Amino acid sequence: MRTICVVVGSRANYSSIKSVMRAVQAHPDLALQVVVGASALLDRYGSVVKFMEKDGFAPDERVHMLIEGETPLTMAQSTGLGLIELARVFDRLRPDAVVTVGDRFETMATAVAAAYMNIPLAHTMGGEVSGTIDESIRHAVTKLAQLHFPSNDRAADRIIRMGEDPKRVHVVGCPRMDLVAEVARLHSDPASLPLLLQEGVGGGIDFRKPYLLVMQHPVTTEYGQGRDQIEETLKAIEELHIPTIFFWPNADAGSEDIAQGIRIFREHKDDSYIRFYKNLPVETFIPIMRHCACMVGNSSAAIREGSFLGVPVVNVGTRQTGRDRGANILDAGHDHAAIVSAVKKQLAHGPYEPDTLYGDGTAGEKIADILSTATLSVQKQLTY
């Protein structure tokens, strides 16, 4: 039996790998190890670990690796601390393979630790194009990984063009789509959405009426501009004055600038039509996203889950520049008038046809099956 160690470092990480964890846990030839670290452990980012435990994933290790400050300095330091702590964890757990997700700084720490310790590394969601530092981290992790699980053929082609062995590149779809497909089947009526007013802060939302969903994170390569950027988005939301669900930013450098902009808005403006959340379980988030009139911001969820669900999206700024997207996306710069105009166009358009660009909802089981049979080795070379 092979032992597969999955490292979860954020709320986005968990939704991106949950179906794989479930499939590995259920597979007769695999044993699951779970390591939880970084913002996934912290209440200010929604205590993702609590949702994981509720889902039946007891952490084998907890890694405190997030240095407070949300600056480029603390982001680099957190990566270094994560490398030190994860090396210790891997030394104790001795997994046969490690699975890491996407492109965050904790992903980098995971990849380097596994590589130096001669532990085969499997990487999901590689080969994609985007803005910010995530682009560089994603491709760096590709060069450290031995098994690749890209979301689509375009991403797979980029991985192979980087010199990776085509036999180790498996197009399986994005595991996040597994949860989207599963949850969407259960919540077809907005009236079936759970009552959320016991959580979060701000005004109430009637899910039977049109509402916006906003998720805007810092752009690490535009550090120092986050406050101005979120203020433009908030001006647009204020002008539109439509009931809005608003999520706090992630833990990347510049997060505090965005959080400060939101706090000042709440102190000086009418927020009775907005409800703010740190985090929600995916079983709640997906129905909220599916039934929103328009999603606004720069989260990859808008690009990935949004295309699968056909949700109208206004993508703001450069964080997702170059990422493969469906017809449901309109881009806008950090200018409130441009954001308002784009949102109005999306509201007039309404829902789009679903697009399976990022998978059909079956990635988790495919990845588990491949992990159970693939030849695991640590030596690799360029193929050109």
Image: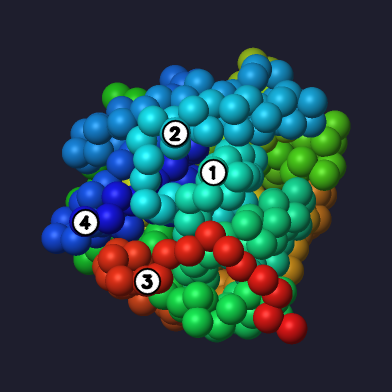
Tell me what residue is drawn at x 80 percent, y 49 percent: 334
Looking at the image, which is closer to me, 337 or 34?
A: 34
Q: Which residue is mark 1?
A: 117
Secondary-structure class at tag 1: loop
Looking at the image, which is closer to me, 153 or 148?
A: 148
Label 2, residues with CA under 10 Å away: few <14, some 14-19, many ≥20: some
Residue type at mark 3 is: Ala
Percent across and percent down for residue 85 are 53, 26
Mark whose residue sits in front, 1 or 3: 1
Q: Which residue is mark 4?
A: 1
Cα–Cα span, label 4 and label 1: 20 Å
Q: Which residue is mark 2?
A: 91
Cα–Cα span, label 1 and label 2: 8 Å
Secondary-structure class at tag 3: loop
Label 3, residues with CA under 10 Å away: few <14, some 14-19, many ≥20: few
Could you tell me if residue 22 is visible in this image? no
Q: Which residue is mark 3?
A: 374
Q: Earlier in the sequence, mark 2 or mark 4?
A: 4
Q: Earlier in the sequence, mark 1 or mark 3?
A: 1
Tell me what residue is drawn at x 69 percent, y 52 percent: 137
Secondary-structure class at tag 2: helix
Q: Earlier in the sequence, mark 2 or mark 3?
A: 2
Are the residues tagged 1 and 3 within 8 Å (C-beta)?
Answer: no
